[in-house]
């Protein structure tokens, strides 16, 4: 098995020196174990936080141990009758081409003709659920709301815009980091307006895109985006604080918004969440997403980097914005 391990903790932006590629001889299977060849590995922003040795909602990665996280693959050897050879599985064993563990640590996933397994790592899986939970349970989206989404062209963001519309949002506005992404937001993902946050001041661009103000803000970015949203909120506005990627690789403390007092004067609610606390909403999400997806109402994009040895690059490229939709490392050709 070829594995990617964290060998030192990055300060600021990670580099290749923080990782090693290790080759491991796998033992014969023990009773109850399966061997799985990964097809797609998920690289996610939260992994950057786990590379630090600081208190967070998930334990830091151990130095010298493989990077764990979401992946999908197929059983190639089995000593567990419940997961025969050929079964497609989702698991958290992460950045390796082949993994071998107890069958109970893998979840069989239904195979739908024409639906790539990789979608279980994003629109039909974790990032889709994150979008749904943030809009519903956290921000209390109401039909007729105007919604602003930052990081709108990423895996979570592309799901947020579409789900918001399907749940009755009146107007959805997105921001992303390139002209191509901005174009895609309005042409493919149903955003009513979108802007490139790198082109000019976020606050000013949001004001122009939302002349009537916003009711809901889905925050993937933090920093200047959160500050701009606080200025644009209508009374009673609600923010789902999902991520703050603008600060994940900074070495200095990120400055707080200068306009927090708007929370008081406009009666705003800002609520943070991590998905782990809302997994009970997965069945409700599936109930909604399955028919939406089956009737062709859901668009998605994948940006794919090939090869286990390029997984670190996939991760770093994602942090830099090279992806549209979900960034994935493809390990074995399905
Ligand atoms: P994305 O697919 O959105 O990829 C990350 C994107 O972030 C990049 O494509 C880039 O797009 C954007 N970005 C990078 N740096 C900056 C910056 N300085 N300012 C603005 N945008 C930036 O990743 P995910 O969809 O997986 O995750 C999106 C967010 O959701 C992250 O903050 C993540 O931590 C969070 N998250 C939270 C969860 C939870 O449980 N709370 C669960 C899953 C994700 P661009 O070209 O537009 O800059």
Image (cartoon, helix red, strand yellow):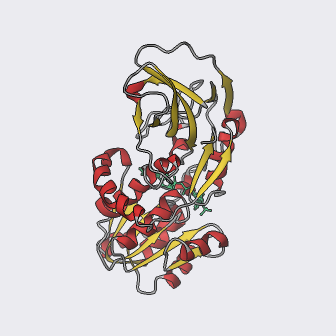
Residue 88 in sight in this render: yes
Residue at 56% across / 41% down in the picture? Answer: 41
- Quadrant of picture, ligand 1: bottom right
Q: Residue furthest bottom?
A: 211
**Horizontal and vertical percent for residue 273?**
36, 52
**Residue nearer the viewer, 37 or 176:** 37
Q: Residue furthest front?
A: 113
Q: Is residue 106 above or below residue 314?
A: above
Residue at 62% across / 69% down in the picture? Answer: 181
Q: Is residue 283 above or below residue 193?
A: above
Q: Is residue 334 above or below residue 212?
A: above
**Horizontal and vertical percent for residue 261?**
37, 70
**Residue nearer the viewer, 254 or 35:** 35
**Horizontal and vertical percent for residue 204?**
55, 80
Residue 216 in sight in this render: no
**Residue nearer the viewer, 238 or 141:** 141
The part of the image, by quadrant, that contains residue 66 is top right
Q: What quarter of the picture does the N terminus occupy?
A: top right
Q: What quarter of the picture does the C terminus occupy?
A: top right
Residue at 62% across / 52% down in the picture? Answer: 318
Residue at 41% across / 25% down in the picture? Answer: 103
Q: In this view, does 132 lie above or below 308?
A: below
**Residue nearer the viewer, 13 or 35:** 35
């Amino acid at each position: 098995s070829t594995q990617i391990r964290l060998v030192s903790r990055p300060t600021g932006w990670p580099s290749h020196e923080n990782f090693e590629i290790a080759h491991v001889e796998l033992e014969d299977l023990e009773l109850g174990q399966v061997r799985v060849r990964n097809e797609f590995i998920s690289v996610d922003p939260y992994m950057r936080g786990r590379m630090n040795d600081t208190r967070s909602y998930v334990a830091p990665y151990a130095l010298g141990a493989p990077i764990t996280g979401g992946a999908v693959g197929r059983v190639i050897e089995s000593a567990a009758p419940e997961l025969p050879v050929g079964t497609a599985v989702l698991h958290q064993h992460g950045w390796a081409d082949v993994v071998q563990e107890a069958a109970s640590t893998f979840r069989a996933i239904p195979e739908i003709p024409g639906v790539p397994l990789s979608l279980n790592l994003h629109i039909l899986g974790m990032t889709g659920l994150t979008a749904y939970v943030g809009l519903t349970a956290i921000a209390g989206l109401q039909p007729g709301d105007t919604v602003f989404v930052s990081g709108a062209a990423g895996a979570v963001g592309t799901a947020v815009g579409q789900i918001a519309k399907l749940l009755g949002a009146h107007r959805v506005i997105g921001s992303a980091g390139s002209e191509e992404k901005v174009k895609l937001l309005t042409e493919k993902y149903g955003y009513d307006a979108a802007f490139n946050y790198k082109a000019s001041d976020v606050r000013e661009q949001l004001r122009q895109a939302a002349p009537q103000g916003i009711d809901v803000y889905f925050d993937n970015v933090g920093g200047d985006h959160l500050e701009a949203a606080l200025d644009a909120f209508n009374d009673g506005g609600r923010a789902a604080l999902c991520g703050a990627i603008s600060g994940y690789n900074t070495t200095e403390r990120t400055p707080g918004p200068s306009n927090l007092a708007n929370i008081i004067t406009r009666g705003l609610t800002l609520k943070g969440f991590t998905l782990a606390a809302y997994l009970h909403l997965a069945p409700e999400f599936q109930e909604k997403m399955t028919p939406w997806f089956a009737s062709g109402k859901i668009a998605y994009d994948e940006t794919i980097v090939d090869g286990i040895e390029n997984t670190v690059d996939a991760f770093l490229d994602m942090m830099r914005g090279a992806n549209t939709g979900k960034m994935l490392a493809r390990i074995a050709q399905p």
